[in-house]
Amino acid sequence: MDKQNSSLVKLLLEKIDHLDEAALVKKKVFNVANLQMYTGWSLSKIYKLTSARLIPFSKPTNGSLFFEREKIEEWLLQNPSYTETELEEKVNTHLKKHRLENS
């Protein structure tokens, strides 16, 4: 394969990857393969999380695992680490609130 064809194939593969990602974001329910693509996790990690019941999932009678995208997003965003600015704002808000209550 010459250099021009190789570049064209590479470009087409990149476009296909972008289409796959766009389609994935629109899905409401993921299977294990979708979740793996969405998060970048290994299958082993996904199965360990479900086995320990640390991640929200559904398991219909056929044994397949399914994951609701919105619940996964909520779960991924729990326990945030705040920036210094956000922490200062929270402290100031808390102090103002308690000063008003104690006045």
Image (tube, rainbow, N blue to C red):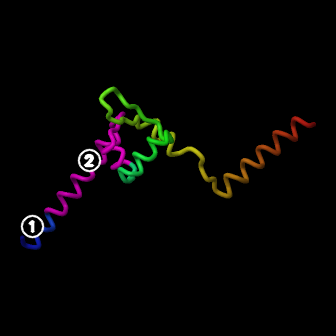
* Residue at x 43%, y 35% (from the top left corner): 57
Tell me the kind of residue under disc 2.
Asp
Residue 21 sits inside the magenta stretch: yes
Is residue 20 rendered to the left or right of residue 48?
A: left
Look at the picture and state if 56 lies above or below 33: above
Image coords of residue 100 (percent x, y): 87, 37
Q: Which mark is residue 5?
A: 1
- Looking at marks 2 and 1 on the same chain, the residue that comes earlier in the sequence is marked by 1
The residue where tag 2 is placed is: 20
Instruction: Give the CA separation, mark 2 to mark 1.
Output: 22 Å
Look at the picture and state if 11 lies above or below 4: above
Q: Quadrant of the C terminus?
A: top right
* Residue at x 47%, y 36% (from the top left corner): 56
Residue 64 sits inside the magenta stretch: no
At numbered mark 1, what does the secondary structure look like: helix, strand or loop? helix
The magenta segment is 9-38
